[in-house]
């Protein structure tokens, strides 16, 4: 199955990944009790499909992230960075609500650590 679609809940984001149509979107609040379990399907999708995808813009739009999500998200971003370093045309679109400077700073911090192109986009 090259499509992974998980609806958002009160404590976890919506996840929509589609290898055929080159869609990678994770949006919402991420304060799950077990961030590893929440993002494991995403990690598995990356492992299963991204070696065959040459170009991918990965969109993240969080309203809030727990500290455990930060850790798992960093691991996920490292996997995308590894593929970028192997010659894939991958980039990160980090969206944030316009007044949310903290979420913008979170994206900037990730971009300063990782060697993969980041774009930042405010949303109203």
Image: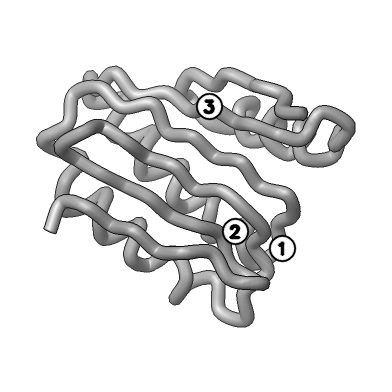
Give residue 8's quadrant in the image.
bottom right
> Going 37% across and 67% down the picture, which residue do you hit?
40
Q: Label 1: which residue? A: 67
Q: Nearer the viewer, residue 57 or 51?
A: 57
Q: Residue furthest bottom?
A: 33
Give residue 71's quadrant in the image.
bottom right
Q: Label 3: which residue? A: 93
Mark 1 vs 2: CB contact within 8 A:
yes
Density class for disc 3 (Cα within 10 Å; few <14, some 14-19, many ≥20) is some
Front label number (1 vs 3)? 3
Q: Real-space Cα distance between discs 1 and 3?
A: 21 Å
Q: Is residue 80 above or below residue 67?
A: above
Q: Secondary structure at mark 3?
A: strand
Dot label at residue 42: none
> Going 61% across and 27% down the picture, which residue do you hit?
111
**Residue 29 screen position, x and y as percent:** 67, 59
Q: Is residue 39 left or right of residue 100?
A: left
Front label number (3 vs 2)? 3
Q: Which quadrant holds the N terminus?
A: bottom left
Q: Real-space Cα distance between discs 1 and 2?
A: 7 Å
Q: Label 2: which residue? A: 71
Q: Real-space Cα distance between discs 3 and 2?
A: 19 Å
> Going 21% across and 33% down the picture, which residue do you hit?
21
Q: Is residue 15 above or below residue 89?
A: below
> Going 66% across and 47% down the picture, which residue do you hit?
62
Mark 3 vs mark 2: which is more N-terminal? 2
**Residue 78 screen position, x and y as percent:** 43, 42
Density class for disc 2 (Cα within 10 Å; few <14, some 14-19, many ≥20) is few
Mark 3 vs 2: CB contact within 8 A:
no
């Amino acid at each position: 199955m090259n499509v992974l679609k998980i609806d958002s809940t009160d404590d976890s984001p919506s996840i929509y990944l589609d290898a055929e149509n080159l869609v990678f979107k994770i949006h919402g609040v991420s304060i799950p009790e077990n961030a590893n379990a929440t993002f494991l399907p995403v990690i598995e999708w990356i492992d299963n499909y991204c070696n065959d995808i040459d170009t991918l813009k990965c969109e993240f739009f969080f309203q809030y992230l727990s500290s455990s999500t930060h850790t798992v998200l960093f691991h996920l971003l490292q996997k995308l960075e590894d593929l970028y370093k192997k010659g894939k045309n991958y980039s990160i679109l980090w969206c944030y609500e316009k007044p949310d400077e903290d979420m913008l700073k979170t994206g900037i911090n990730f971009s300063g650590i990782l060697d993969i192109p980041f774009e930042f986009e405010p949303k109203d």
